[in-house]
Amino acid sequence: MIKKLVLNNFLSHKDTCIRFDPGITVFVGHNGSGKSSIIDSITFALFNEHTRKNNKNLITKGIDQTLSEESGSFVIMDFSVGSIDYKIQRQIDKAGQLLSAKLEILENKSLDNSTKKNSAVYRQVISGERKQLGESVIKEIESILKMDYQKLQIASIIQQGEINRIIDSPPKEFKELLNNMIGLYRLDISFAFMHSTIDEFRKLLREKTGGYDDNHIDILITKVKENKNKIITSKESLQKIYSDLSEKTTLLDNIEKEIEFLEPKVSKIQEIKSLENVLINYFKEKSIALKSNIEKTKKIIVESTNAFIILKDKDEVLITLQMIQSEKEELNKKLNTLEGEIGKLTGLTECAKKIQIKDGKCPVCNSKINMINDMFDIFHIKKELDKKQKEKKLIVSESIKLNTEDLEFRKKEKNIISAERLLLSYEISTDKDLSNLRTNLMSLDKDYQTIFKLNFNHFNDTNLVVYKVDEYSSNLVNDIINIKKDIGNINLEDLKQKKSLKNKLMVEFVDIQNQKAILEKNISDLEQEIVDFEKLLSELYSASGFIYELEKIRSMVFNRDGIVSSSLRTWALNLITIKSSEYINTFNVGISKISLIEKPREIKILCYGKRGEIDLISLSGGEKVAVSLALRMAIAYLMGSSKIDFIVLDEPTSNLDEERRRSFVKIISDVFSKGVGPLSQIIIITHDEEIFENSEIEQIYKFSMSDKGSIVTPI
Ligand SMILES: Nc1ncnc2c1ncn2[C@@H]1O[C@H](COP(=O)(O)OP(=O)(O)O)[C@@H](O)[C@H]1O
Ligand SMILES: [Mg+2]
């Protein structure tokens, strides 16, 4: 029950204080005089809620400027719930910001009246709206009243035109009205919200699973099945590949063994080839060496033979040379003698020329003479000189001859010395030596011929023995023969084929290996995929279970026509039926029972009088108001349970015709002044000044507007 209201600077109320007593309180006044503002002050105080959009609009404007706009507003309300008295006050600043909210409780209620009056001691219950800190006056009020703002609006505030609407709305709209009143519209919100919640959940699911939600379960199951089938086929292929591989491995092993056996032999063939080359080169070199040796020996033989021929005349030449020397000396002696004689004779000739017989007389004695002595006879001397000259000439020519001969023999002597030197250099001293040399030449020649006859350009490998010419070649040939024996018959073509077969097999092997790896990877991928899918599936299964539950909850709980909703409505309808019947009986209008019947899309209101069911249309205006009021009170009871014992009716008579208005006033005055059921307080707001004029109602407040704001005066 509301006991006192103080409005300060609140809407059109600069400073208003109203006291309330149990029973009916009526506010009368012209439109705009500030009556409905009282409702706003109540909801503002309790819940910080009102019909004026925002708190800033609550602050008084346009009246007594100096004061109003500078300070904020506050409302103080004293009220009781059950036996407890509360005081609530809420204050906002000029910007509409909450300055304080305080809920206090009156203590010492048990004390006797006189003490209580003098010392009303209030203890603070809670202060402020700091919900995050758990401090909230609103929350505290909600828990005391057991309802929130919306519920209070339905339970305790009957809006303008509502009474009329209840009875005049078509059954379909009435159902909607009722749904809204009992809060079923919230189910619609939840119903829609739950849909988006489920959608959101699916979206989250898809984000988490990479695009899958519960709708994909069948697809995933199919995929798992497909994968399993694929694995089976792949494994079959893999089996074939395994046997192929083992077959190829055996083949390769065998071929490799064969090649391993043949390979060293092939290298021995190379060895033979190189030995043959060594042999051929040896023969080539040897042939050249032999040839030059032969030439040299031949030359030595020729030269030595010549030297021997020269040396045959050696003794003779030496003796001759001696003889020539002595002869030369003889001749020289003779010549010298002769030259002396010739000189003497030449001198004598000169003398003889001067001893001439002149006129038969001797030149010396002048005696007559016939002839000169022979000794002085020139002719005689000349004859002698000639003779001597001739002799000299002979000796000179003989000497020349001898010189020539000397020269000739000197030359021979020189040749002999050369020949001797040559032989010395060849170390040949005897004929035997020479004949040895000849024998040697013959043997060289023979060797040369033997090699010459060999065809070492085209190596004859079938008859190797012919190449056994000397020790060295014999050894080589023996080596070759031994290696050949060692190798035996080897077919190079065969080896080549084996090698190419091996290569082919290797390629195939690698190919199969690759196929194997691909298949194995494939299988493991598929298996992994199955594991992933199954994990996903188990997640999706539980998600789907969850979604199923959510859907179930949604359709059962939140669906307007679901079990919860309809049973809630059925329960509400029953309660309303019972309560409204109770009320209508007290109204004394001849209606004994009201019944609400739910149809799929509508709720029908049935009324019963003494003569049974009465059609709504045939009800009188007054009866209609009574039914409406009864229904509205029942709904208020339903919503307010037992905590709220006051009800505010804002302009209940507007839209009512005269008959209905009279019925309304009568019912209110007759019935509610005594209090109906749990209700102990009714506040009626009306601009209809005269309707309660002659009633017995005690508390009537007159609202009027002045230049100082709303003025409230009790009548
Ligand atoms: N912030 C405000 N300051 C001063 N007056 C206001 C304010 N808000 C509304 N009003 C006035 O209050 C009156 C409306 O009050 P209301 O309680 O709804 O009247 P009624 O008596 O018709 O129910 C109007 O005259 C309106 O101009
Ligand atoms: Mg009003």
Image (cartoon, grey):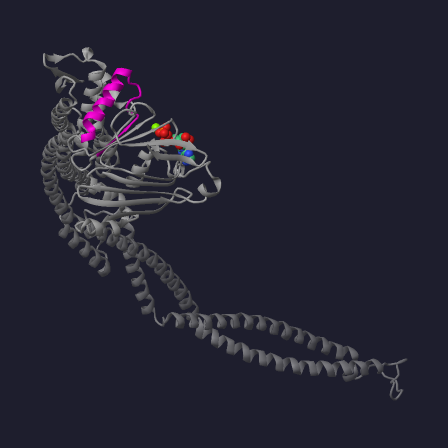
In the displayed structure, 332 sits above or below 478; it is below
In the displayed structure, 167 sits above or below 449; it is above
Does the rendering let one see residue 175? Answer: yes
Of the pair 210 and 532, the residue shown nearer to us: 210
Horizontal side, residue 604 vs residue 378: left or right: left
Residue 4 is drawn in which quadrant? top left
Q: Position of residue 77 (x, y in %)?
A: 29, 42
Of the pair 121 and 501, the residue shown nearer to us: 121
Q: Which residues are magenta?
A: 646-674
Q: Residue furthest bottom?
A: 365
Q: Position of residue 176 (x, y in %)?
A: 22, 22
Horizontal side, residue 321 vs residue 41: left or right: right
Residue occupying image coordinates x 41% and y 32%? 705
Of the pair 539 and 180, the residue shown nearer to us: 180
Residue occupying image coordinates x 68% and y 74%? 390
Residue 44 is drawn in which quadrant? top left
